[in-house]
């Protein structure tokens, strides 16, 4: 233990709530921030190449989305799975599910054009995994997670509808 003279020591108290919160918020923001930087960088290269070499805008848009969904998303999902290789190295099934989680997150980001749904999804995933370490009744967690998803979806749709009506 490192001790400095004249500096008072106190133990850090970690409550179950803070363990759940810090165990879900910080990894979600850190992992999503890094992976979305890579995704947006590759999508930017894709957009540049499509606009540079394909003169018809409709065809360029179609090619952009085909490349984004079929080439860039699996590459980024592979990087996502490699981040989680240490945590899931003992289970190939868990690592494969993590790959598909990253792939679906990339698709959500490309479809909506915003990173918030993927970030919220990742946060909620980490939140309920940490919560399941403390809670003993799994059925309640499933119900709570479904209700939380319905609530977040309703809020997101309401905000989008409000902004759409405001623009008109």
Image (tube, rainbow, N blue to C red):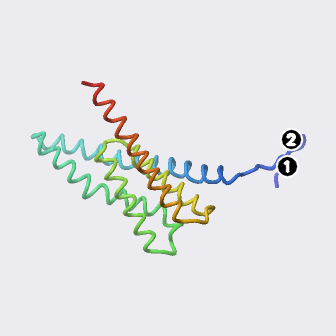
Q: CA distance from mark 1 to mark 2?
A: 8 Å
Q: Residues within 10 Å of mark 2 (few under 14, many from 20)?
A: few
Q: Secondary structure at mark 2?
A: loop
Asked if 135 appears above or below 147 in the picture, the reply is below
Taking the image as shown, residue 144 lies to the left or right of residue 6, namely left
Taking the image as shown, residue 41 lies to the left or right of residue 124, namely left
Which image quadrant: the N terminus?
bottom right
Asked if 151 appears above or below 82 in the picture, the reply is above
| Residue 77 lies in quadrant | bottom left
Estimate the x, y position of residue 13 in percent, counting from the top left: 76, 50
Residue located 54% across and 54% down the image: 127
Q: Residues within 10 Å of mark 1 (few under 14, many from 20)?
A: few
Which residue ends up furthest to the left in the rendered image? Answer: 56
Residue located 16% across and 48% down the image: 62
Residue 7: mark: 2
Total numbered labels placed on residues in the image: 2
The answer to whether marks 1 and 2 mark residues whose Cβ atoms lie closer than 8 Å is yes
Taking the image as shown, residue 114 lies to the left or right of residue 142, namely left
Residue located 58% across and 59% down the image: 130
Residue 35: mark: none
Which image quadrant: the C terminus?
top left
Residue located 54% across and 52% down the image: 27
Estimate the x, y position of residue 116 in percent, counting from the top left: 41, 43
Asked if 163 appears above or below 111 in the picture, the reply is above
Estimate the x, y position of residue 18 in percent, counting from the top left: 65, 49
| Residue 51 lies in quadrant | top left
Q: Secondary structure at mark 1?
A: loop
Residue 3: mark: 1
């Amino acid at each position: 233990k490192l001790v400095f003279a004249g500096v008072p020591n106190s133990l850090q108290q970690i409550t179950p709530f803070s363990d759940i919160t810090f165990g879900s918020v910080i990894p979600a923001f850190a992992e999503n921030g890094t992976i979305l930087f890579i995704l947006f960088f590759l999508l930017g290269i894709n957009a540049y190449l499509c606009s540079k070499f394909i003169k018809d805008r409709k065809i360029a848009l179609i090619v952009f989305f085909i490349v984004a969904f079929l080439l860039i998303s699996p590459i980024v999902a592979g990087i996502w799975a490699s981040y989680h290789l240490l945590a899931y190295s003992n289970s190939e099934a868990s690592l494969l599910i993590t790959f598909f989680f990253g792939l679906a997150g990339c698709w959500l980001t490309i479809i909506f054009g915003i990173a918030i749904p993927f970030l919220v999804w990742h946060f909620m995933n980490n939140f309920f995994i940490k919560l399941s370490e403390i809670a003993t009744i799994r059925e309640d967690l499933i119900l709570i997670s479904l209700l939380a998803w319905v609530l977040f979806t309703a809020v997101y749709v309401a905000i989008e509808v409000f902004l759409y009506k405001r623009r008109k």
